[in-house]
Image (spheres, helix red, strand yellow):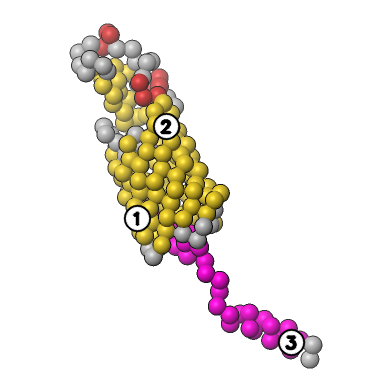
Amino acid sequence: MRRAPLLLIVGVMASAPAARADAWTAAPRTLELQLGVASPLGVGVALDVAPVRWLSVGAGVGHSATAAQVAGCVRARPWAGPGRALYLGACASAGGYREPTPDETTDRVAARAYWASPEVGVEWRGSGVAARLFAGPTFLLNPDAVHCSGAAVAACEAGETWGTAMPFGGVAIGWAF
């Protein structure tokens, strides 16, 4: 008979409504459209998955101002409420690269440029809708892959790439499910 009170307590706890989950636990996946300037995807689509409330991993495809891009990101949410969070992230991306020189007759180009992009952002989730604002610096990891093409190749120094480090920013809007 000593088990009866314990079984009663367990039964009541099991039938009690569960505590309201935060937005990332309730809808851990987001399919999003991204629009950014010098960002890992440029204009693109990505899938983001939150295996735990405080961490997301994502990947996507997009197009920068000059070429196709692929990117992967990891985002940690050290400060989060039920439907909003401030996060810190790290992204890696790859794609073609083209940058005009000051005289605009020659371009610095790379068939494949690799970038590292730490970011900070703010995100919101609620009723199936998700949105993020993000910004940070981006760094070209393989400047030796850049070469010059165009009319004034002799005046172009492939090693002096303007865009080896630059700021980026963007917005992502999507469907959380």
**Of the image marks 2 and 1, the number of the one nearer the N terminus:** 2
Residue found at the far top of this picture? 154
Q: Residue furthest right?
A: 2
Q: Amino acid at mark 2?
A: Thr
- The amino acid type, in three-letter code, at marker 1 is Gly
Return the x and y of residue 167 as percentages of the image width and height: 39, 31
Asked whether the residues under the numbered discs 1 and 3 touch, taking CB atoms below 8 Å apart as contact, a structural biologist would say no
What residue would you read off at disc 2?
138
Magenta segment, which residues? Answer: 3-32
- Residue that label 1 marks: 174
Which SS class for mark 3? Answer: helix
Circle 1: element type: strand
Q: Give percent across and percent down for residue 163.
A: 36, 24
Q: Residue at x 47, y 37 (%)?
A: 118
The quadrant the N terminus occupies is bottom right
Q: In the image, is 58 to the left or to the right of 32?
A: right
Decide if residue 128 is on the left or right side of residue 8.
left
In the image, residue 101 sits, relative to residue 83, either above or below, namely: above
Residue 49 forms part of the magenta stretch: no
Q: Is residue 169 above or below residue 175?
A: above
Residue at position x 29%, y 24% in the image: 99
* Image quarter in which the C terminus is found: bottom left
Name the image quarter holding residue 126.
Answer: bottom left
* Left or right for 165, reference 98: right
Residue at image position (33%, 40%) is 36
Secondary structure of the residue carrying tag 2 is: strand
Q: Which of disc 3 and disc 1 is earlier in sequence?
A: 3
